[in-house]
């Protein structure tokens, strides 16, 4: 009887990362059937999705969160940032290592600055380690979307709360309450200095994806497509460096 060959561990991912052996598309489709239309053999004959298709990537994220983290009905508005789940899970695992955790410890409090419409860091921290999390943002529509996700997942209601930052010039002030203490803060800052810079960066990514599929160049994206509505999630005056100095 032939032994089944173990899947190679993906380089660079934390040993505890549930995605360090790649995507199990048959299992993901079984737990989240909405993913099925997007899964097909790639140029190498293995199952995959078109990572240049925002809807396919969003559906893959929903499937991953459903199967591995028991989060249902995850969704984001058209144009909002769609974070890579394996990489975001890695951040949480390494954060746990930095503060000396090897197991679930609900007493840890995490603050996510600019949680966006996806709320991904607190969602994963709650489900992986049972931490108590606060997500802040200046965009009330983004917070409303995350609130919908929380409402659809009752186990999150006592562990993940949201706060609005009313002053774009402040990060912690107005969010952290007097006498309140957080063990860790995380942030995915707006790393572009302008919409034009963000669009050029996205086009480079699309071109790289096209080359990986054997195509010469991806079609030029219109600013009305893909992620431009993300606004403060993607860019701010001065970019990432100025944001971190503010």
Image (cartoon, rainbow, N blue to C red):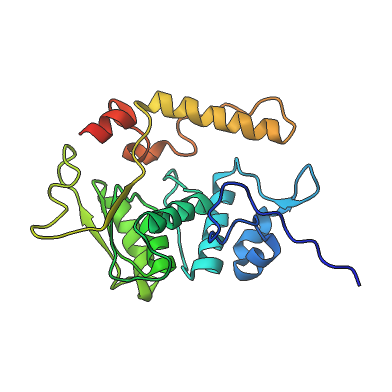
Q: Quadrant of residue 227?
A: top left
Foreground residue among 194 and 34 = 194
Residue shown at the point (67%, 32%) measured from the top left = 210
186 relative to 35 in the view: left or right: left
The location of residue 197, given as percent across then percent down, is: 42, 24
104 relative to 147 in the view: left or right: right
118 relative to 11 in the view: left or right: left
Q: Can you say whether 183 is above or below 230 in the image?
A: below
Residue shown at the point (16%, 52%) measured from the top left = 175
The location of residue 124, given as percent across then percent down, is: 42, 61
Q: Residue furthest right?
A: 1
Q: Residue furthest bottom?
A: 154
Residue shown at the point (69%, 54%) measured from the top left = 39
Q: What is the total number of numbered labels drawn onto the structure image? A: 0
Q: Quadrant of the C terminus?
A: top left
Q: Can you say whether 53 is above or below 218 in the image?
A: below
Q: Can you say whether 241 is above or below 14 in the image?
A: above
Q: Can you say whether 114 is above or below 121 in the image?
A: above
Q: Quadrant of the N terminus?
A: bottom right
The location of residue 104, given as percent across then percent down, is: 39, 71
The location of residue 83, given as percent across then percent down, is: 47, 48
Is residue 74 something that shows in the picture?
yes
Q: Quadrant of residue 59?
A: bottom right
Is residue 221 something that shows in the picture?
no
């Amino acid at each position: 009887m032939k032994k089944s060959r173990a899947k190679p561990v993906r380089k660079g991912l934390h040993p505890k990362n549930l995605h360090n052996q790649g995507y199990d598309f048959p299992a993901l489709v079984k737990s989240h059937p909405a993913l099925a239309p997007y899964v097909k053999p790639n140029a190498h004959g293995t199952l995959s999705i078109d990572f240049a298709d925002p809807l396919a990537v969003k559906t893959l994220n929903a499937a991953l969160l459903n199967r591995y983290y028991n989060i249902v009905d995850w969704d984001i508005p058209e144009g909002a940032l769609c974070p890579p789940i394996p990489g975001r899970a890695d951040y949480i695992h390494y954060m746990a290592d930095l503060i000396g955790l090897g197991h679930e410890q609900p007493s840890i409090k995490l603050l996510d600055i600019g949680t966006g419409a996806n709320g991904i860091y607190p969602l994963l921290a709650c489900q992986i380690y049972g931490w108590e999390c606060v997500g802040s943002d200046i965009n009330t529509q983004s917070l409303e979307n995350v609130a919908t996700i929380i409402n659809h997942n009752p186990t999150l209601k006592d562990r993940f709360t949201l706060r609005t930052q009313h002053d774009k010039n402040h990060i912690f002030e107005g969010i952290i309450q007097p006498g309140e203490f957080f063990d860790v803060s995380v942030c995915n800052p707006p790393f572009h200095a302008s919409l034009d810079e963000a669009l050029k960066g996205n086009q480079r990514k699309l071109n790289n994806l096209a080359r990986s599929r054997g195509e010469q160049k991806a079609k030029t994206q219109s600013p009305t497509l893909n992620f431009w509505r993300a606004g403060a999630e993607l860019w701010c005056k001065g970019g990432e460096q100025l944001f971190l100095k503010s």
